[in-house]
Image: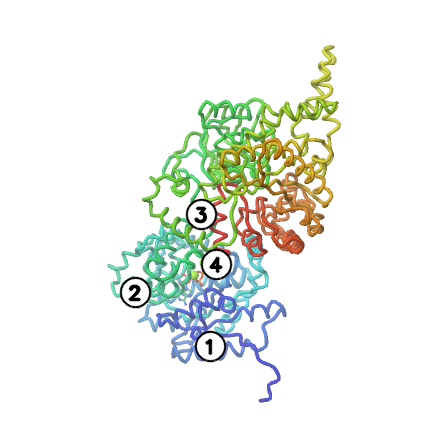
Amino acid sequence: MGHDRVMTKYVYAFSEGSKDQKDLLGGKGANLAEMTNLGLPVPPGFIISTEACRAYLAEGREPEALSEEVSAHLEALQKEMGKTLGQADDPLLVSVRSGAKFSMPGMMETVLNVGLNDESVRGLAAKADGDERFAYDSYRRLLAMFGSTVLGVESEVFHQALEDLKNDRGTKNDLDLDVGDFQDLVATYKKLISDHTGSDFPQDPREQLDMAVRAVFDSWNTERAVLYRRQERIPADLGTAVSICSMVFGNCGMNSGTGVAFTRDPASGAQGIYGDYLQNAQGEDVVAGIRNTVPLADLEDINKPSYDELLAIMETLEGHYKDLCDIEFTVERGKLWMLQTRVGKRTAEAAFRIAVQLVDQGLIGMDEALQRVNGDQLAQLMFPRFDVDAERNLIGKGMNASPGAAVGKVVFDSTTAVEWSDRGEDVILVRRETNPDDLKGMVCAKGILTSRGGKTSHAAVVARGMGRTCVCGADSLDVDVKKKVFTSADGVTVNEGDVISIDGTTGEVFVGEVPVVDSFVVRHFEGDEAAEGDELVAAVARIMEHADSARRLAVRANVDTPEDSTRARRFGAQGIGLCRTEHMFLGERKTLVEHLIVAETSQEQEEALSALLPQQREDFIGILEAMDGLPVTIRLIDPPLHEFLPDYTELSVAVALEDERGERDTKQHKLLDAVTRLHEQNPMLGLRGVRLGIVIPGLFAMQARAILEATAERTKAGGDPQPEIMIPLVASVQELELVRSDIIKVAGEIEDEREVKLSFKVGTMIELPRAVMAASEIAGVAEFFSFGTNDLTQMTWGFSRDDVEASFFGTYLDKGIFGVSPFETLDRDGVGQLVRLAVEKGRESRPDLHLGVCGEHGGDPDSIHFFDEVGLDYVSCSPFRVPVARLEAGRSAG
Ligand code: ADP
Ligand code: MG
Ligand code: MG
């Protein structure tokens, strides 16, 4: 009665919380509460909520009610323990532990033994059968932890003092230090604290507690914590909880100790006894490398009852959390105490194995198993790896641009790459950076190494698209393409033909051959029966099957050749979402394109086009055959034509030299004229996509003819070709209408000529903001939309992918403007809203409009979930990403 507002509750006893309250109690606190309520031996304590932290950070001081609430909980704790905090003759001591919803390095560390002071340290000794060494060991630990984490003295200062003392005593082992040594250390530490901070170590136990709690709150905003949150995309306003836990002591003799454990092997998922134990030690000693730990299994001999109890608890935890757990525990004079648990991190391999093991144990169902793995983990399992036991000679390191392990002879240009690989050699293409001219070399190389450029450089993007191993930006390597040599920082020289090994998963570059182990998972996808017996493969296969049955979203592949189409099908692709036709204009066909561009009369132009026609037709026949019965989206030529022409500078020099020698070659001159004419300041915003089709008569008609003649031929051969002709870079419905009517006309001609009924679709890419706004009208003409999210991202943000990453992306990522490049993961708030809008407008005017995405985002897990959410029909990605997309589409549906 009379309360006019509800009081916020800031403090919770362990018994009041549960594992589902990570938001409020932090991960550590929530799991301590959970274990307490499971009846496990957890030292009693309470948790100050993240809400208190948020209030503190907002107001700059503790909320008024907090101190009283802490007092009430402390009193209850003291009653339960039968002693008061820091009580002179028998002190209650506590640990003050930080713990946010997500575990976060960079936050304040834990302070142990809070409540000790000059008086209570003697009480602690007296109560421990006069074990003064133990008491002063505990006190010096408090001084060092409090001094560094609460009072801000460099921890190195305390560390050095301890080292000095050990040196003085002629030992490296802390077990050799006696009570006198620790008393000396306590005096030294107290002096260091007053010297560095200008005030004495606080003797009042409650003051220690309050200061430690406040320091945990403050640590939410340390530079390291802020940076970590940005990188991991953890919201900045969650705040941390603080757990106050009564102390148990692993440092009171050899029948005490502290340890860590996993309920299964986090590397393989195998069940067994995994962990480390350290006798007569406290807190982090076990992981700090103070002394050599023993394997957890040895605890059986050291202390059988505790060991048995621990094993039973581990089983309880697994059964309860239904997952691998990691654990921190302490044994105090033979009695086991649980100090922490959480669902443990694991390798990709273990994730798949554990998920199906848990299904087989009846702990979880397949739906849950599917949520326990993810596409990144699957991708990791698909790359070949270097044998970790082999000898390796590291000569440099760059960015891990596209994972995998590649070994081959070094080549410095595309032509040599093609020649050598044609005669069966494995090559690694080494360049300072790559450009579209290097494509052929990149296609046939085992791996690509560049000394410049970041994760969104041309080399990285193209390599990822092809599933080719790539290390980029290895700037310690000096690459001289002309001299065909590169040199490492240590002066190792690598010539053309020398063998190197590159690891696209770590970014490492080795000279010489490092043995590679194949991915069994890929062999399985490729239908290799030898892979079937493998346990990991079986786990992956089961989960994939479930993903396929759960998903709504179809998965297609971005491929341009019959071989890749076949492979993509084996990987589970349900069609082609993007068949680029410009790759079909490379090689010797480049000359045909040159003819087309320099043509002066319409007859010359027609001749050039009809020379290209049969070649394109052959390409399409092969692809439609490989994808028989499945949709094949073919994009008409997209990039600016200058990409097919010689370099402007080189050509002008060549022409000038010829002129000087009086060997005037009109063909060269015409070519130079064309190159000059087509030169653009901003090719990305220039004559490309549908604009080419409108400006160059006959070009799109020729492509459409090649596609539809191939379709006619496949139909006549009894096949089921399903071509979808896709027009790139459309901004207005008029553009699409123009091109579409040409295509319809060509189709009519072919149907008459060949006496066959053609079945095909015409649609468009949505990759310009204007196309989004005009999506209703465009959908009136287009039978499908495919979102070209690469261009849509460029055009929406107004930056060119090929340029910006080297210039300012690094800074943007550092400053947290985006947590991840918008070219890697779709920018939901900006570009994503455009996608959403186009979907709505498009379906409004044509309810059966078919919708897909063919940008690189089609293979990115987070983006796939978004595309599913907005109701696309399919995603399309490189063949290698197809299984990843299937898995993520399944997870998204679940
Ligand atoms: P972290 O987040 O770094 O794991 P913790 O809060 O878990 O920090 O504590 C650090 C170390 O101190 C751990 O080894 C933990 O087991 C130990 N520890 C924490 N609280 C207590 C306690 N009340 N009694 C004994 N050891 C403790
Ligand atoms: Mg730690
Ligand atoms: Mg811990």
Say few, some or many: other residues with alpha carbon within 10 Å of mark 3 (under 14 / 14 to 19 / 20 or more): many
Q: Amino acid at mark 1?
A: Leu
* Of residues 513 and 82, the one drawn nearer to the viewer in this rendering: 513
Q: Quadrant of residue 697?
A: top right
Does label 3 or label 4 sit earlier along the sequence? 3
Disc 2 on helix, strand or loop? helix
In the image, taking residue 277 as reference, residue 850 lies left or right, namely right
Question: Tag on residue 139?
Answer: none
Does label 3 or label 1 sit earlier along the sequence? 1
Does label 2 or label 4 sit earlier along the sequence? 2
- The residue carrying mark 2 is 312
Does label 2 or label 3 sit earlier along the sequence? 2
Disc 4 + disc 1, Cβ < 8 Å: no
CA gap, disc 3 and disc 4 = 17 Å
* Of residues 222 and 502, the one drawn nearer to the viewer in this rendering: 502
CA gap, disc 2 and disc 3 = 33 Å
Q: Quadrant of residue 752?
A: top right
Disc 3 on helix, strand or loop? helix
Question: Tag on residue 894?
Answer: 4
Mark 4 or 1, which is nearer the eye?
4
Q: Which residue lies most toward the top here?
A: 662
The x and y percentages for residue 403 are: 48, 40
In the image, taking residue 167 as reference, residue 234 lies left or right, namely right
Looking at the image, residue 728 lies above or below residue 95: above
Question: Tag on residue 378?
Answer: 3
Disc 1 on helix, strand or loop? helix
Q: Quadrant of residue 668?
A: top right
Disc 2 + disc 4, Cβ < 8 Å: no
Looking at the image, residue 820 lies above or below residue 3: above
Within 8 Å of ligand 1, the CB of disc 4? no
Mark 3 or 4, which is nearer the eye?
4
